Image (tube, helix red, strand yellow):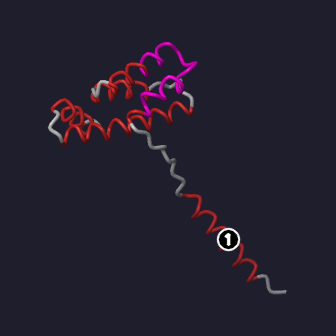
Amino acid sequence: MNIRPLLVSVASALILAAASGCSKEEVVPELTANEVVSGAPEAFKGASAEVQKLAADAAAAISNQDYPTAWEHLQALNSNANLTDAQKEFVAASIAAVGAEMNKAEEAGNEAAEEALRFHRANK
């Protein structure tokens, strides 16, 4: 009995399985700034008072289109080790949404957004 074709088939299957699983990327859900504002209370319900305050402050800053301040609050939230996985995902999506808004503000000549983005790029 020739086992070579079986070995080739098994090796091929292993290579395909490894190749398809190696590039597992986490997809951050896309949110708009309004969805961040409306979703923050529910996302951080049951969190510590400090975390809830940061989330509320970020949402308030977004509502006021003060994206640099929202960015700071979201970065502080992002560094909190006590967030749940769902909260981490919400913060990541929120940072992406606020980053997009800051880019728009920078292009429109908003100096505060420009300065915040310059600081962020310099400290990556």
- Looking at the rendered structure, the kind of residue marked 1 is Ala
- Residue name at image x 44 percent, y 37 percent: 92
Quarter that holds the C terminus: top left
Quarter that holds the N terminus: bottom right
- Could you tell whether 122 is left or right of 15 in the image? left
Q: Which residues are magenta?
A: 35-55
Q: Residues within 10 Å of mark 1 (few under 14, many from 20)?
A: few
Residue position marked by numbered label 1 in the rendering: 13
Residue 45 colored magenta?
A: yes
Residue 21 figure quarter: bottom right
Residue 50 colored magenta?
A: yes
Q: Position of residue 109 (x, y in %)?
A: 14, 37
- Residue name at image x 34 percent, y 25 percent: 63
- Residue name at image x 48 percent, y 44 percent: 28
Q: Main secondary structure of the magenta part?
A: helix
Q: Position of residue 102 (x, y in %)?
A: 27, 37
Q: Position of residue 113 (x, y in %)?
A: 22, 33
Label 1, secondary structure: give it.
Answer: helix
